[in-house]
Amino acid sequence: MGRNPGVVTDDPRWADVFGHEEPYPEQADGIDAAIDAAEDGGFLALEGACGTGKTMLALTAGIDRVRDPNSEFERVFVLTSVKQQLRQFETDLETINANLPDGYDSVSGLTLVGKADVCPYARENRGGIDRENVYERCEGLRERTRNLVGEGGETTAGALASEARSQQVGLLDSRNGSGAAGGGSTDGPAADYLTVDGEPTPYPPDTETFGETEFCPFYAGFLDDVPDDGGDPAEAVPFDATELGHVDAEELVRLSAGHGSCPHSVMGALVPEVEVVIGNYYHAFDPTTAATFTGALMDDETFLVCDEAHMLEPRVRDLVSDAVADASLRDAVSEITRIVQPLSFEREGAESEDADLVRGELEESDVTIEELEAVREFYGDLREELDRRVTAHLDRERPDWRASMRDLEDDEIPLRDPEEPAEDEITTWAEEAGYRDRVWSRAPAVGATVKRVLDTLEDEDKRRAAPGVGRTLNAWYREGHTDFFRAIDLERTRDETEPPDSWRRAYNASLALYNCLPSGPIGERLGEFGGGVVMSATLEPMDVFREVTGLDHLAERGRPVVERTYGLSFPPENRASFAVDAPKFTHANRGAPGERTETRLAHLDAVETVASREGNVLVGAPNYAEAAWFADELDVRLEKSVLLDESSGDRETESLKHAFFEGEGKVLVTSLRGTLTEGVDYRGDRLAAAVVCGVPIINTARPRTRAVIAAYDRRFESGFETALTVPAVRKARQAVGRVVRGSDERGLRVLLDARYARESWNGVRKYLPDHEREEFQPVSTDMLSLAIDRFETGR
């Protein structure tokens, strides 16, 4: 419901942009806390149970700051790692706009998506462009378009766009048989436009050529709209975003492509112009994306909203880690060879048309032919060393691996003791082989030069390997050995083109540079913003969260970090919460799936007790293998349908969710490390109960996991708990938090493992916030059924 602007109230000013009639008390407190913290350059660290309105809280605080003429904030930047939550921000922004008081301008907003989602050709699979090759094709077409219209170019952007439009008009004339010369009927076939989602564009269905050069007419159209004096790119946006409210991907494509302009370029031009930008973690924490696309948002005029912040540490760790694949090394060697060969042929007296071009490019760069050859030799030798190490590892660990390649699993070869910082074995090998500072440090410049030359020599659009290889190997040599761990990753594959006795037939291998402690990069990036909110349904314990995300470092520099934790405010009689004192569901206690151990049977009996109740029930297991075991056993015991979630893509997951929600009550069994236990909206009667089996701590045998624990021990003196136990408890809390999301919903929440029920040496009850420790009352396995009966009968 909207607010009545004609009524004088004592409401705070932010009430005008709050999208509902009245906030929950927790929302009002949180909005005030976020505003106060941001005005002092700080952050609100907010834990709020599912259904407490965190999205509206954060948007209201941010928009209030942006619209306050006395505030320094110019925009809100929303980050979330879950698509469901991204859509929730879009929905709440639309709710805000629908309920603004009379005379208020709509809040302008934009959702950031990838090129594959907005490229007109990729969306329609035309012009030789699809979702798989859109990045390579787009970059090649853009570069050729810029070369045609840039300084010293052969034409102008306006001429290219006009030529493409005239091609379409020509097709229209020829197909309709219209015009004075054609005469006759005008009832011929329709013009051959490129249509996107049913909407026509001004251009033919495929890319165009100018002479022998292929170009993108949509990008030419965008460049034509950019002011000639190199002014503000926002002037090239063909619509007024301030009048449209929120613009999603579909609307962006329709408005941009219909005008004849590149939607992705328009999106980039709009980034600093709208009041609310909605994106994902990549848009802030991926170094390449932030440098090339969203850099305008990284300043103290941006109010940051970081949602699902319990995932901030693991997601950013992946983004600030890197790897060089064996195949990339191979391709980089080939690319450098393609450049070196023309000059080699010339030295041998053979004529080469490419030699002059290569020599000219090298003269304009600071890279010499000797450096190209040195880096190529280094990459070749590095690949041979990688081959030697993988072969030796397999010979040692699996002597029969050549005869049983189909049975090989993902693996990891540490390049130092994970518990002790030391120089890695690859760096040591390179030093002994004579590859010292010069070759490592020049690798990025060589990679950039290779790309530039090859893009000139070859017409084919493709992503070059040499630039990425150069950047990563430079970081490999530059980064320290305390916070970074180096290893060889072996990822299972099947490549029949490789020799039968080669491990490459079974594995993709990579030199992995793993950032064990991302708190530095996280804190540094958060510090670039003016302030804001970092929030989740599961942040507690707050002291750990602040340490691992660098918020404590910001506080030490005088930027306040304010904390709020809000439990469920819905009627307590509508929910029952139990911590069941079942045997600890550890690997040592339960044994392998299929073993009929006492621990397994106790957990299976308890899960059956919960799953047999009416309605949909979510069962969370520590991993997918355990989930499969529970699903098989429950399928025999229950009359309900039992659905199993396996590691799969988005399409399969969406189909499984649809099947779960439709019809009579079912049981859905999944991994607590999967995607169905957090970020999914089980509103209304979609979920009656959730039961978590065990504490989903990841496998500690993996070398990089041991390296993370050791790094956290050195930094925080509690490596295992900080790095593994706390995130695992958050995963469990996320799952049971799906059940009750509104004041009229009822549900059952069960944490099944003695570690949730008792205080013990490896207990996790202390990691539950105070309000959850009060709610999740310990109960024995033999009393669980009775406790549930009492809840269901209201006794």
Image: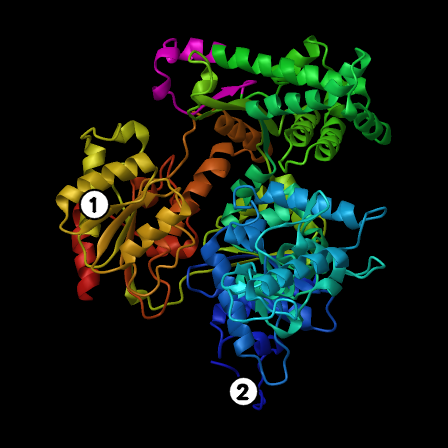
Q: Residue at x 69, y 8 (%)?
A: 432
Query: In this figure, what is the number of numbered marks?
Result: 2
Choose the circle earlier in sequence order: 1 or 2: 2
Location of residue 372 with respect to 392 vertically, above or below:
below
Q: Give yes or no for residue 387 being in the magenta stretch.
A: no
- Chain part drawn in magenta: 392-417
Q: Left or right? Give the position of 442 relative to 217.
A: right
Residue designated by label 1: 606
Disc 2 residue type (three-letter): Asn
Mark 1, other Cα within 10 Å: few <14 / some 14–19 / many ≥20: many
| Horizontal and vertical percent position of residue 277 | 61, 60
Which sits in the foreground, 201 or 471? 201
Q: Position of residue 509 (x, y in %)?
A: 51, 23
- Please give the residue where the numbered disc 2 appears in the rendered image: 4
Q: Is residue 592 above or below residue 635?
A: above
Q: Dividing the image into 4 quarters, which one contains the C terminus?
A: bottom left
Percent x, y of residue 192 = 55, 60
